[in-house]
Image (cartoon, rainbow, N blue to C red):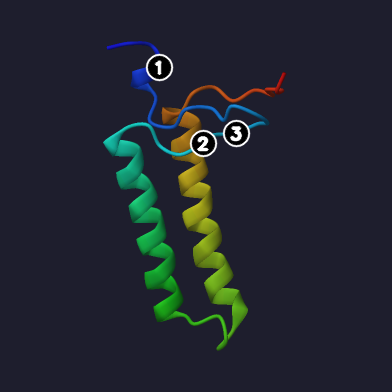
């Protein structure tokens, strides 16, 4: 296994953070995140009250960022040439 293939989320080429997933595990995490947002939005529509929707979306986003931090390439600033 090469150094870059062990990361589920490779670093972006420019800027800070992660790009699209590089492994099937990363794609699965991203699909679960999107499904969770859709399901939470159906259960607690934003039109009915933004509070419950924002809490659920916030928890899902924090979970996604934590997984990216743990399983992704270490982020750092990258500049184009």
| Residue projecting furthest to the bottom | 48
Q: Residues within 10 Å of mark 3 (few under 14, many from 20)?
A: many
Q: Residue at x 55, y 66 (%)?
A: 55
Q: Residue at x 50, y 32 (%)?
A: 69
Secondary element at tag 1: helix
Q: Residues within 10 Å of mark 1 (few under 14, many from 20)?
A: few
Q: Pointer 1: what residue?
A: 4
Q: Residue at x 39, y 48 (%)?
A: 30
Q: CA distance from mark 3 to mark 1?
A: 15 Å
Q: Is residue 80 left or right of residue 4?
A: right
Pick whichever of labels 1 and 2 is earlier in the sequence. Answer: 1
Q: The N terminus appears in which quarter of the rendering?
A: top left
Q: Pointer 3: what residue?
A: 17
Pick whichever of labels 3 and 1 is earlier in the sequence. Answer: 1
Name the foreground residue: 65 vs 51.
Answer: 65
Q: Residues within 10 Å of mark 2 (few under 14, many from 20)?
A: some
Marks 3 and 1: CB-CB under 8 Å? no
Q: The C terminus appears in which quarter of the rendering?
A: top right
Q: Is residue 34 above or below residue 26?
A: below
Q: CA distance from mark 2 to mark 3?
A: 7 Å
Q: CA distance from mark 1 to mark 2?
A: 13 Å
Marks 2 and 3: CB-CB under 8 Å? yes
- Please name which of the two marks, 2 or 3, marks the residue nearer to the observer: 2
Name the foreground residue: 55 vs 39.
Answer: 39
Whole-percent x and y of residue 31? Answer: 34, 53
Asked where in the image residue 51 lies, by quadrant, the reply is bottom right
Q: Which mark is residue 16?
A: none
Q: Is residue 72 left or right of residue 12?
A: left
Q: Is residue 22 above or below residue 2?
A: below
Whole-percent x and y of residue 42? Answer: 40, 79
Secondary element at tag 3: loop
Q: Pointer 2: what residue?
A: 19
């Amino acid at each position: 296994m090469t150094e870059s293939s062990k990361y589920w989320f490779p670093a972006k080429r420019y800027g800070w953070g992660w790009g699209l997933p590089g492994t099937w595990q990363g794609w699965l995490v991203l699909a679960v995140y999107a499904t969770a947002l859709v399901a939470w939005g159906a259960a607690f529509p934003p039109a009915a009250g933004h509070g419950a929707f924002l809490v659920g979306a916030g928890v899902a986003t924090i979970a996604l960022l934590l997984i990216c931090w743990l399983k992704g390439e270490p982020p750092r600033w990258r500049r184009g040439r």
